[in-house]
Amino acid sequence: MAAATRDQALSLLAAANNHGDLAIKTSSLKQAKDLLLSIDPSLAADLFPYLLELQSSPESLVRKLLIQIIEEIGFKAVEHSPTLISVILTFLQDSDVIVVKQSIVSGTNIFCSVFEELIVKFQQYGKVERWLEDIWMWMLKFKDAVFGIALEPGSVGIKLLALKFLETFVLLFTSDISDTEKLSSKGVRKAVNVSWLVGGHPHPVLDPVVLMSDANRTIGILLNLLQAVGSLPGCLTITVVNCRDSWIEQVQLLVF
């Protein structure tokens, strides 16, 4: 059964890569995704190299769909997905706006999921597996790249999503934000944040002091943007002002 499923998935991925009809490409890719999600993650991982061939697809719709599939598979087979997740970082440099925007959206979701997994594993076992540390390193590279997008000239639509990631970053790594409803409304699953680590033994990649310091620096970035809202496009101004509600208490601490 597993061999037949593997062969069928390979055939569908080949169609997604090589067929000339875009509708058949996307339909084949969606069917391949369903098969990959239906089998054991370790077996699915053997097919990831064929899936990743699609990152060079000339059709932006295929590349966008690939990102969505990487996000979905990454949640189910996180132990086997470092290579998949690294592709999200590559797509931040894509030439098509819709692909970059999907990369930020999916990358933000993966970032929150991986951070939660790190905390849960560390609390349960007192350590974090090497593969999970590797994924987190990719997530930190994703964070740095999105911060750069937020601060550099570029597409307004992309910058909006980058600013929302900065907001999520502050919510995750500011220990005195503990309102579950507030965090959930911002898309942070299960209200996980750095406060879960305070008072425990620090881990090299989960040092709460370092993480909260990063959050403070991010608040400073948002504060500078808030002070410069008059020079920003209207929709960016609205986004920055809306973000303010999530970190206003931290800004007040910095100012006063």
Image (spheres, rainbow, N blue to C red):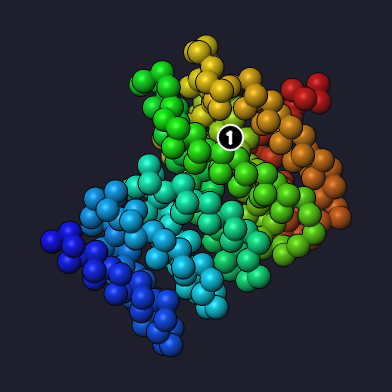
Residue at image mark 1: 171
Left or right relative to 73: residue 93: right
Question: Relative to 14, does residue 89 appear above or below in the rendering?
Answer: above
**What residue is drawn where x is 38% and y is 55%?**
72
Q: Residue at x 54, y 71 (%)?
A: 56
Disc 1 secondary structure class = helix
Instruction: Give the answer, above or below, for where 28 lies relative to 107.
Output: below
**Relative to 221, does residue 30 appear above or below in the rendering?**
below
Quadrant that contains the N terminus:
bottom left
Identify the image quadrant of the C terminus: top right
Front-most of residues 193 and 226: 193
Q: Position of residue 26 (x, y in %)?
A: 39, 76
- Which residue is more in the foreground, 65 or 39? 39
Residue at (28% x, 68% y) in the render: 9
Q: Is residue 51 left or right of residue 170?
A: left
Whether residue 116 is visible here, answered yes or no, is no
- In the drawing, does residue 105 fall left or right of residue 230? left
